[in-house]
Image: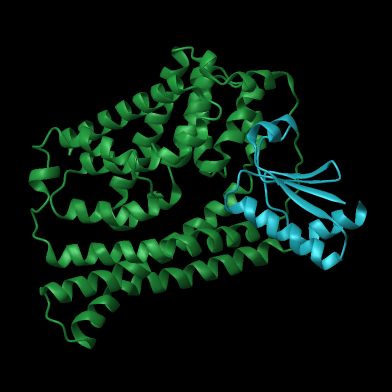
Chain colours: A green, B cyan
Amino acid sequence: MKKINIGKAAIIGLLGFALWYVIYKQLEPFSYFFAYSLLGLEKGSHLGDAVQFFVYDTPKVMMLLTIIVFVIGMIRSFFTQERTRKYLAGKRESAGNVMASLLGIVTPFCSCSAVPLFLGFVQAGIPLGVTFSFLIAAPMVNEVALILLYGLLGWKVAAMYLGSGLLIAIVAGWIIGRFKLEHWIEDWVQELRAGEALVIEKKLTLADRIEHGCEAVRDIVGKVWIYVVAGIGVGALIHGYVPENFMTSIMGKEAWWSVPAAVVVGIPMYSGAAGMIPIVEALLGKGAALGTVLAFMMSVIALSLPEMVILRKVLKPGLIAVFIAVVGTGILFTGYLFNLVI
Amino acid sequence: MEIKICGPGCASCEKAQKVVEAAVAAKEVDASVTKITDFQEIAKLGIFSTPAVIIDGDVKCVGRAPKQAEVEEWISNS
């Protein structure tokens, strides 16, 4: 692997970021120019608003997504599942729950690596509750979701999402730990405790880490862009055409039953975070309450049927039921809390 | 030569398989490439993050899809 001069890399990085920022700042004026001057659409008309919204939000979200996915991709090259396992192996429960949730954000993870990861955690003697904190945080606090929330709804909503996602992971994991459900892990998993985990670490250079970042951009942005564009398209249509208070009676604050309904409806639905956000934005824009919408989103992302099916290979049904119940309750509380506070 | 790829079948596991197959084709070696998808079997090998690549019983990498040049080197050295 060729060596990269750190100073040179930093200068190129800064210049790149400056250019990125200049373009980013031009997006909003450009969208007004495009919709109202170039196409000559009328300001305040349905079509004009929808076009302006689409032309502004699509490049904005894609630019945010690219830069953050790159940075997270580089950060992730410092955290492998092996290292995370080692960090957590010696931790006691409460501190372990907090660390596991935080590591859940930065450790590379996909839903089908959940089982090997679970096995590795059990094998390393990590408490069950701590393992669950990780398994809850990893999909729920997702960098793509955070960026989209920040880009479309502002930093406050993004921060609240981050905070409540972490809190649910920590508390739910801790509670599952209190139940002492180790006997609900499948028997063959228990026998692994004796074995030794194989670890092969590769030394990474700065060039490797930059490559990691680029690969993450290719992988993630390459996969989700179509959902983002389609989602913003739907969002733009709703933005321009659906009446303002359309959702208020169904998903507004007054409808107390809408929070549990949102959680239940969300469980069988499965979508990555990216596909959810434009829907979230559209619902909010039309009078749905923030708590209800976030509960819906968390339920879709964190409680997914396909993941349950995979986890069933290592967990007995009782433990899966407890997992759904505890996390579902956490999401429910978050939903009501946000509806109450905001 | 016997090459095994451990992985339940997600995107990066499939990438690992493609890379290995390309490397085998490039080196023109006689090798069988098979997949292990059963979690229990994978765990028994001491592997807890996927994908992993095993060449003639030697575990070469764990928890990532290797690059083609790497795999070619492993094949040469085996």
Instruction: Please identify the quadrant where the N terminus of chain A is shown.
Output: bottom right
Query: Can residue A52 be seen from the camera position used here?
Result: yes
Q: Residue at x 63, y 31 (%)?
A: A85
Work out whether A205 lies above or below A50: above
Residue in front for this viewpoint, B36 or A113: B36
- What residue occupies the far right of the structure in this picture? B77
Seen in the image, is B49 located left or right of residue B1? left
Please identify the quadrant where the C terminus of chain A is shown: top left
Q: Position of residue A103 (x, y in %)?
A: 53, 36
Residue A80 at what x, y percent from top left?
Answer: 64, 41
Toward which corner of the image does residue A281 lie, by quadrant? bottom left
| Residue at x 26% of width, y 28% of height | A333
Q: Quadrant of residue A188?
A: top right
Q: Is residue A23 above or below residue A209?
A: below
Viewer-proximal residue, A300 or A22?
A300
Location of residue A51 with respect to A69 vertically, above or below: below
Q: Position of residue A224 (x, y in %)?
A: 44, 60
